[in-house]
Image (cartoon, rainbow, N blue to C red):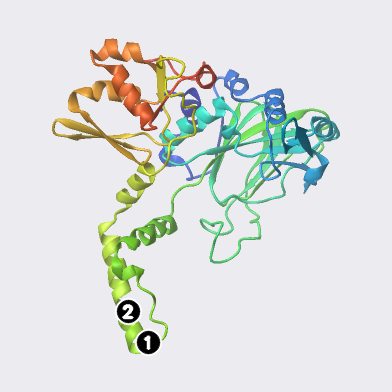
Amino acid sequence: MNHHRLVGAIEKALCWDGPSELGDTFARGKLADRDLCGRLMTPTRLLDLIMRRSLSAARISCLQDGDYVHPQTYLTTKAMRRAEAVQMVDMERLGILLKEGCTLVLDGVNAYDATLEVACRALQWRSRELVQVNAYLTTGSAAGFQMHWDDHDVVIVQVAGEKSWEVRGLSRPVPMYRDAVPNPTPTDEIVWKGTLQTGEVMHIPRGYWHQATRQERGDGFSLHLTFGFPKRTGVDYFTWIADESRQAELMRHDVDRWGTTGARKEQQLAFTDMAVRLAATHSLDDFLAAREDQSSSARHVITHGLFGMPLSVVCMTEFPPRIEQDGDRIVVAAATRRITFAAKALPAVELLTCGRPVFVDKVAAATGLDAMTIAETLIREGICAEVTPELAAGYDGLLTPEAP
């Protein structure tokens, strides 16, 4: 889905030649089109989004002077007519915190906002990694998190205001959340120190120490979006092989705790031999393909045609579907599904699964095929979804022009 404006804008700003440079080195740059920032998110839109949803402390947090504010300060339980009470943000209390100066954090904004959902999916299709975006609104002279490192690569887009940053290098190579040893001490190596202005972009690789603040800046605010890219590691590969080993009867047997030492040694050798065979027959390419094929589609509205036939559809899979040619058939592999079509359906299938919303009648006119029947199959199998006006708003103005 390289036709999303954010994908190309980030790569151009960071002087990247494609997604392979994700996680490589620190990079910073400026978006060529600052108007993209307001289209992604604004402070008031973020607050409106927060106001209209039931949110728990696991999703929303506030910090003052670098410390967490107790959730009871800004969360309240609201009684609903003829329904159980739900937890919601007390907007008056939150407004007081923002006036005093605080950092408001909303995790996984893409779960609530169509524009950022679409942006994350575009970045996923480009990077072939799952992407989540968090929003950070800082007001006044508030500090943010203390110096820390993330166990995934991040791309930060400053969409409004400005914020000061300090980025340091690694103190442990490729650290992990679950690691062999702790990684508690920042390095003294300063990679970059300065202020991100509206429209600037920064890439911080996994393990790089960093902190952001508006201390000593007085009035004003900052809003930035942090796109997180948790890439696959060797540990993930061997975890997948361990899961695949359940298919082998030998690996499902109990460890012979009460047998002789010699019996356990024989069992260990048998396990080891099977592990080597599994690793030899399950390649890294197999691992990556299985991960993409087995990822369910994003949540989406399903109408079953109750409100009429879909006029427009869009692919909703977390990664680009794989289309395999098999003689006089094609197989679409995505979202835990393998769907077979006649080979002549290929032009329509490619258009319907391109990641861009497409009108079904235009696909039919362009290919001369029964595009509605193909679209209905893809919708029924969860690979595509009907484009509702609400979903369409997430794409509006954010796609590059279609090729002729």
Q: Is residue 353 above or below residue 284?
A: above
Q: Amino acid at mark 2?
A: Gln
Q: Position of residue 366 (x, y in %)?
A: 27, 12
Q: Which residue is mark 2?
A: 267
Q: Which residue is mark 1?
A: 259
Viewer-nearest residue: 279 or 199 = 279
Residue 37, numbered circle: none
Q: Residue at x 80, y 47 (%)?
A: 70
Q: Quadrant of the C terminus?
A: top left
Q: Position of residue 203 (x, y in %)?
A: 55, 39
Helix, strand or loop under label 1: loop
Which is in the foreground here, disc 2 or disc 1? 1
Q: Earlier in the sequence, mark 2 or mark 1?
A: 1
Taking the image as shown, residue 384 lies to the left or right of residue 113, namely left
Q: Position of residue 199 (x, y in %)?
A: 61, 26
Asked whether the residues under the numbered discs 2 and 1 touch, taking CB atoms below 8 Å apart as contact, a structural biologist would say yes
Q: Is residue 113 above or below residue 187?
A: above
Categorize mark 1 by other alpha carbons within 10 Å: few (<14), some (14-19), many (20+). few
